[in-house]
Image: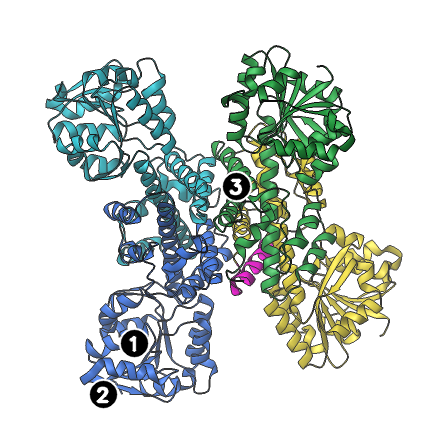
Chain colours: A green, B yellow, C cyan, D blue
Amino acid sequence: MAGQVGFIGIGIMGLPMAKNLVTKAGKKLVVWNRSQERIALLQGELADEAAQVEAAESPEAVVKACDVTFVMLTTPSVVRSVLFDMPGAAIHGVSSGKMIIDCSTITEEDSRASYDAVKTAGGSFLEAPVSGSKVPAETGALIFLAGGDKDVFDEVVKQKMFDVMGKKSIFLGGIGAGARMKLAVNMVMGSMISALAEGIVLCESNELDPAEFLEVLDLGAMANPMFKMKGPNMVQSKRQYTVNFPLEHQQKDMRFALQMGDSSATPMPVAAAANELFKAARAAGYDREDMSAVIEALRKRNE
Amino acid sequence: MAGQVGFIGIGIMGLPMAKNLVTKAGKKLVVWNRSQERIALLQGELADEAAQVEAAESPEAVVKACDVTFVMLTTPSVVRSVLFDMPGAAIHGVSSGKMIIDCSTITEEDSRASYDAVKTAGGSFLEAPVSGSKVPAETGALIFLAGGDKDVFDEVVKQKMFDVMGKKSIFLGGIGAGARMKLAVNMVMGSMISALAEGIVLCESNELDPAEFLEVLDLGAMANPMFKMKGPNMVQSKRQYTVNFPLEHQQKDMRFALQMGDSSATPMPVAAAANELFKAARAAGYDREDMSAVIEALRKRNE
Amino acid sequence: MAGQVGFIGIGIMGLPMAKNLVTKAGKKLVVWNRSQERIALLQGELADEAAQVEAAESPEAVVKACDVTFVMLTTPSVVRSVLFDMPGAAIHGVSSGKMIIDCSTITEEDSRASYDAVKTAGGSFLEAPVSGSKVPAETGALIFLAGGDKDVFDEVVKQKMFDVMGKKSIFLGGIGAGARMKLAVNMVMGSMISALAEGIVLCESNELDPAEFLEVLDLGAMANPMFKMKGPNMVQSKRQYTVNFPLEHQQKDMRFALQMGDSSATPMPVAAAANELFKAARAAGYDREDMSAVIEALRKRNE
Amino acid sequence: MAGQVGFIGIGIMGLPMAKNLVTKAGKKLVVWNRSQERIALLQGELADEAAQVEAAESPEAVVKACDVTFVMLTTPSVVRSVLFDMPGAAIHGVSSGKMIIDCSTITEEDSRASYDAVKTAGGSFLEAPVSGSKVPAETGALIFLAGGDKDVFDEVVKQKMFDVMGKKSIFLGGIGAGARMKLAVNMVMGSMISALAEGIVLCESNELDPAEFLEVLDLGAMANPMFKMKGPNMVQSKRQYTVNFPLEHQQKDMRFALQMGDSSATPMPVAAAANELFKAARAAGYDREDMSAVIEALRKRNE
């Protein structure tokens, strides 16, 4: 039991994270996912090491089988369901000594509720939402923004599990701090990708080559990996929105960040405008495209 | 006459650019500036090479004395005055073979007017607004965004003058293309610094350490030199707005970019919100601070 | 018991509403309010009819004493506390035949929760948030936006109680419809008062007489009672923000309306910008002023 | 000559204004319009009084034939062309004693230029942009916002010409004051119609009847003729955008108002957001629809 680690949620992010725990940290995993196909996919990618992944019949069973369990799910309502509400929810497996690390992006409120419930059941809890999407998850370059029980953080660090999944982990304070930091970072991301989108469309409408625009940006003080990665796919003639971070999730994070600003009376007009742009992109049907598809909300229709 | 180059405008940007032409390209300069003090300052910084800088009595005299003349001034109205309207304006020195390179940030409309006037007087004209502010000007790391007469561009390249002042020069097309590209780039800059400002203030209002926030940003896909340079000075306890690019000039560029989007019916709601934030910062008295002082428009009063 | 009506919440809105029930509909009231002073104030205003108002010791006692009970409280959290969570909460008085009408502005989610709880306890529930603030409450000119149990609506109509408190009551559909309609209306109100504020400040900054501006508005197609009432007090030299609707409550409604738009992917960029302006006014310390004090967020500091 | 009045520009606004001068003030008009058809249309509408309208061959000829000439054109560039640049421009007819009243919506800058040119030529000049669109023009219910030469204002008032075209005329001060006031008013109009549009779409997306929404608005403090006139045509099932004020002109006015705020460092984030919405509506092809078609920029595509 000491050697095996739990992992709940084998999605776009969860799969590569779990894979790194096996291949780079030599962990044996007990996993659960709503659909079995994703588990088979993980096992397929592991090839010779497929036996290191064992499917459990419920989140509860995962927690019972492991001291340390990671959770990586898509939305707050899914997190609530899997941790607390569904039959066989994770909480039923929690007892003294159990450690839960929730890497999902959730609200501070939900994170606090999870913390309280796990503590009440005798366990320990760490929120550790990540900065970075699919590619950093694959290359082990995530950043973990941790808040909650420091001893859980220390244990995961000791077992070098943050090391194989990420390039950095920071303990930011009590429960909620990780969730808040994640939102602050993703809010900047949403405003930045919107700013890039506006710049590209402005070029396209004004006889400027957007490829030269991206080159100029990349030469200057604003050069950043995100622009470099996403920019070329956003121009009119390409429009390839490989989904690293779905637009509806980006919009969700903008919304939560704005609510956080709202409760602290912090004006954030640029983020608010970007959020409305993401909503317009959702209204135009781009929910499940990559967040960089926000550019479509700026384009003339019928093009 | 062949060996000497004209330089009009020895301001925050012009001084280091002129200095690089002397020290790195070995040019002899004929210069004009509204106040003599700036010329003396340039000569003082050149020390042994001070004799390489000769002050002319008017812009007209500069152009008459040189085949190639650079112009680097602060606002469109100053450019208009110095090139066309003041006694001894530069245009009066233009004749066949004279080449004018305007590196100021001006509107496409003004740039076209300058182009037409210089062509009518028999000369050639290149707009070459720069991306980059004080520090890149000093280190010769500007990016020149050129539009207009290709032969002027080629001549400046041949004499390696773009090489010593910048790290890249791009010929973008006919007159106006350089001005438009500059605005598109600066618009993204204005939105990005505003997004950073909102993130910092959000942290400060929600018990998060803004220094950790900057660290997280710097580890991820949004890491960029501007955030790294300006971020640390923007936090509540520091507030050091070293002026690399004055806020009123940034706001001016946002405004021009928005007008460009306006005439092409390109919606740019994020830039528009950022522009209003810069206006609020101006209303709060931060015109002449660095553009990163935009964060003050988000802060509670009486703090 | 048939003749008496319950009223919970004797605040800015509740007091004049309760007063109208007594003076115009001849009702005997059983009331509860967190502070006793407000009840004394109500009795004082009723003079000869003071005996028509009896204070109960708890919300529960009000409901037990009356078939029909109105609730008019300030925030969702106060509503939750008084209806469900505090000792002697209203829900403990609910049994078969009890009718609760909640006139507070709350979220659809909270309204649904109240509905479900009251129904489970055997009672009936109507949400009836009002359009209109202090003055319309006094003059009996509120508009009731009702949703929930139609039989409760019909009973209140039958007893002519909406008639004496308001000029119109509309049954909009199932539970939640009233809350949603209220938010849609208040969102427009917040955007409109912000638009007026911007216009006034624009005049003040550009040598135009804001009084003439208000006169011109009042002559045209945009003339409306709110501009007429609030405009004159908003100009620089007056600045009299008589509190009809506190700014923090207006901002709260904007926020809820935006969340409603968010969950339906409805872009509302103008309301989002207005919301940020209200937040800036809160950051500047105007939470408890009238919502028209939003204009202060546009003004230069140190004036 | 004393009895006849000049009228340049027989467009959507000019035609009913000219008609009122004939039918209600008994004036004989000398008119010019770019296309002859509009003049024939005016004469057709005048029936028995068609002879009161005489077509001149140029703007210059109009001014030469009349002491007082009204100008009512669509855009600043058309105004510049007709007053100054085209062959037979109005300015060539100006001499001592000639009075020009420009009712077009133009920028303060253009208005000042017109003023200066007319004064230089010996004439007098009044800007008198109107508040109100097609219907008020027809019913003689415009509001004239005048600035410039007070004696021109007094003469037009004396001849009761403002009286028959409008319900109010206000002299606001020196040249430019009328243009600025017009922009301030139209800015509020643009923000208000956008706010209404957002409210309607919010209802449509959230199972609320937009007709009931309009009814509620019309009962409350925000009731205004514009909402009453335009609201019913904006709902999803109607979408009838009878053109009273073309969307591209509304957007133009928003832009000019924002530039005015820009030069006075007046933040106007709500107007800026509304302006971007109008731009999005233009990008979607609604330039020539009524300004109320701005609602289409909020609607889901493919509906």
Q: In this picture, is A193 found above or below C55? A: below
Instruction: Find the distance from the CA under tag 2 to the CA under tag 3.
Output: 62 Å
Q: Which mark is residue A268?
A: 3
Report the amino acid beneath label 2: Ala
Give the mark nearest the N terminus, 2 or 1.
1
Q: Which mark is residue D51?
A: 2
Q: Is residue D28 visible?
A: no
**Secondary structure mostly taken by the magenta-highlighted segment of the chain:** helix
Q: Which residue is mark 1?
A: D15
Element type where label 2 sits in the image: helix
Report the amino acid beneath label 3: Met
- Name the subunit of mark 2: D
- Name the subunit of mark 3: A
Q: Give the magenta range.
A: B249-266
Q: Which mark is residue B123?
A: none
Determine the residue positioned at 81% across, 58% down.
Answer: B19
Residue A272 in picture, x, y percent from top left:
50, 44
